[in-house]
């Protein structure tokens, strides 16, 4: 059984559309594990708890988290539905990065980075991760973010359980578009 399609379906359910599998999330984004398993079995009849545990354990981006006794599960970030993941305020590194696609540049140049359908803008600590993110959406474009100045100016940053930096928006004055050709040559 291939885990990637199931993991993607789990992300859809736990971040955006729990109703598609007949599950509910509480105000903090938690779903009952047994309910999630039954919901996923509607699409993937062979799905069992062991497969769920393997997906969570081996996910390279650490998208999911169990509660202490593994009776509840949630996505660590990336929600488009209103949930309070109880992120803690954190002091960001001086510089962060955002990867996007070239097709979004004109909109970004007008309004900065906004969360659109998600609750937060996601920022990376390294260029390589930002490039990977950008490539998922087309020809990548990377922005360097002056997180230190944003923070000094009172903008609140959060750090997710899987070390993604989150912010409500990034105004233009804190952004610098990087030349991707020069990045790839170094």
Image (cartoon, rainbow, N blue to C red):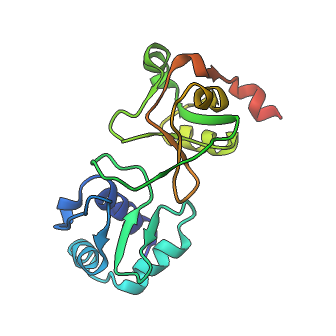
Q: Residue 64 appears at what percent x and percent y?
A: 45, 65
For the image shown, how many numbered marks are present on the structure?
0
Residue at the spot 22% in from the left edge and 73% down from the top edge: 39
Q: Which of the 4 image quadrants contains residue 53?
A: bottom left
Residue at the spot 37% in from the left edge and 84% down from the top edge: 49
Q: Which of the 4 image quadrants contains residue 24?
A: bottom left
Quarter of the image with the C terminus in it: top right
The reply to whether residue 28 is visible in this rendering is yes
Vertical order, 135 against 39 (above or below): above
Vertical order, 160 against 42 (above or below): above
Residue 47 horizontal side relative to residue 148, left or right: left
The reply to whether residue 143 is visible in this rendering is no
Q: Which of the 4 image quadrants contains residue 144?
A: top right
Residue 75 horizontal side relative to residue 177, left or right: left
Residue at the spot 62% in from the left edge and 43% down from the top edge: 91
Q: Residue 142 appears at what percent x and percent y?
A: 62, 30
Quarter of the image with the N terminus in it: bottom left
Q: Residue 27 appears at what percent x and percent y?
A: 26, 58
Q: Nearer the viewer, residue 31 or 44?
A: 31
Residue 23 horizontal side relative to residue 118, left or right: left
The residue sitting at the top extreme is 110
Q: Nearer the viewer, residue 71 or 61?
A: 71
Q: Nearer the viewer, residue 158 or 129?
A: 158
Vertical order, 76 against 91 (above or below): below
């Amino acid at each position: 059984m291939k885990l990637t399609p199931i993991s993607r379906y789990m992300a859809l359910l736990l971040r955006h559309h729990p109703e598609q599998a007949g599950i509910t999330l509480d105000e903090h984004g938690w779903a009952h594990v047994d309910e999630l398993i039954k919901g996923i079995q509607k699409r993937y009849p062979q799905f069992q708890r062991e497969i769920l545990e393997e997906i969570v354990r081996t996910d390279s981006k650490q998208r999911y988290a169990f509660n202490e006794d593994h009776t509840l599960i949630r996505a660590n970030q990336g929600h488009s539905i209103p949930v309070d993941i109880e992120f803690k305020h954190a002091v960001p590194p001086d510089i962060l990065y955002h990867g996007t696609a070239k097709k979004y540049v004109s909109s970004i140049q007008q309004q900065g980075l906004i969360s659109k359908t998600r609750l937060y803008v996601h920022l990376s600590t390294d260029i390589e991760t930002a490039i990977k993110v950008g490539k998922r959406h087309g020809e990548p474009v990377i922005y360097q973010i002056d997180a230190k100045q944003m923070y000094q100016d009172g903008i609140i940053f959060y750090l997710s359980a899987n070390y993604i930096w989150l912010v409500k928006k990034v105004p233009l004055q804190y952004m610098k578009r990087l030349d991707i050709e020069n990045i790839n040559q170094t």
